[in-house]
Structures are given as C-alpha cells and as structure tokens.
Image (cartoon, helix red, strand yellow):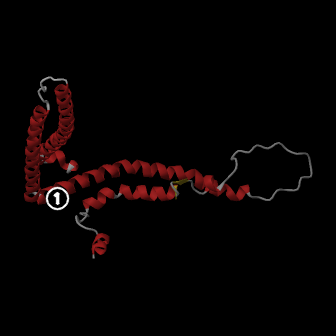
Amino acid sequence: MFESIHTKVPDLAQLQQVVTNLEQETHEAEGRVAQLHLEAQSAHEDDLNREATALNAGRRAPRPTEPDVRAKLEGAQRRLEVLQRRLALAQSDVARYISSHSDELVELVQKAKASKAREVSELAAPLAKALGEFQQPDLDLRALQPYLELPAQENTGEPESSITVLGPLTTRSAFGEKIADQTIGQVQNIVTELVGLAARYEQGDTTIVGPSEAEDEGAA
C-alpha cells in the first residue's frame, strides 16, 4: 500500500513494515500450531498402542510422549494469540497514521501521479513521432495507387521484359496495418493522448477517490 510514495513517508513505511513482519510471523505461527496439533494426535495414538502392548507383555507402561507435545502446542498457541494481538495493534497504528495525515498523503499521491504522467509523456513523444513516420510509406503507396490501376494496352508486338518494383499493393500495405484490431493511426491517436498526459495533470486534473457512479447505482 502507498508504494508510489513509499520513500516520501518513512514513518508510514516503517509502520507498514512492522505489519508485514507480523503478518509473516503470524502465518508461520499458524503453521506451527497446525503441525503440533497433528503431532499431538499422533502421539496420543502411539502412547495408547505402546502402553497396551507393554501391559499385554507384562511390562510396565512406557512414559507417554503426548504431554510433551501438548506442552509445545500450548506454548505455540499462546505465541500465536500474542502475535495476532500485536498484528491488530500494528494495523491500528497504520490506520491512525493514515487518518491523521490523509491530506498530506493525498497531496503526495497526486504529485507522484503527475510525475509519472510526465514520464509517460516523455516516453510516448518519440513513439508518436515514429508511428507517424511509419505511416508515411502507406500514404506514398496510396498516391501511387491510380498509376498501378491503368488499363492494360493491347499487345501488338513482341512481349517486353518488365520488372515489378512495388510488389502487390494490398489494403494491409497501403491503407494501414492493424495492431490488436486497431489501425496504426488509431494506435498513434492513443499514443498522442499519452503525450498530452503531463499537461493534463499540470492543469490540475485529478481523480476523485471513492465509489464510482456505476458502483453507486449498483448499490442503490
């Protein structure tokens, strides 16, 4: 959470790291408790079998192993409960920090968004230019189209040698290739919009945080 401004709010990052660490410890503790539960059940059955075998053989019953496993299980369960409470407290600390610094966090997030918008714009600008240049041969081929469709003259003499320079002129080559069902021109329009992304955020365009209109209508 808040990865876009992680380095800008070290206090929040530290609180979140505590939560992450406790979540990991809690997960491991849950696994340990589950494992000891199985070991305790196995020890219980093993103790009964060994005791029955020994008594039938006229020997003294062996020392049971289940109590030791149960003691470990009790300790693991207590540790898990403590970790769960620590995790809840740490999550509350994060929530309180966010609540008390919400305005500051909103501003930092908006600045991060504007910064990334500038980065996207800078990357998109040369691509938009290259896409325009990529379409120029299509325009040139379109200009040649009328000349390639002249009616053939009647052949009254010896056949003359000929060379095809342009090759077959198809809709794909002369009127725009497609990428993901969109023409290069449409792709260029999208990239051009990305070029203007930085200017949009510099003008103060922001996204309102909260339920969308569609969500509101669905909830009604």
Which residue is farthest bottom? 220
Residue 65 point in image, percent of width and height:
14, 30
Residue 91 against residue 58 in the figure, above or below: below
Q: Quadrant of residue 201?
A: bottom left
Direction from residue 53 to residue 117 in the image, left or right: right
Query: Which residue type carries mark 1?
Result: Val
Task: Return the residue nearer the eye: 85 or 210.
Answer: 85
Q: Which residue is mark 1?
A: 106
Residue 19 against residue 68 in the figure, above or below: below
Residue 82 point in image, percent of width and height:
7, 44
Direction from residue 167 to residue 96 in the image, left or right: left
Q: Quadrant of residue 51?
A: top left
Residue at x 9%, y 54% (from the top left corner):
92
Residue 183 point in image, percent of width and height:
53, 57
Task: Return the residue nearer the eye: 53 or 24.
Answer: 53
Residue 216 against residue 188 in the figure, above or below: below
Direction from residue 72 to residue 57 in the image, left or right: right
Residue at x 45%, y 51% (from the top left corner):
129
Task: Return the residue nearer the eye: 49 or 212.
Answer: 49
Residue at x 22%, y 52% (from the top left corner):
112
Direction from residue 38 to residue 72 in the image, left or right: left
Residue 59 point in image, percent of width and height:
14, 23
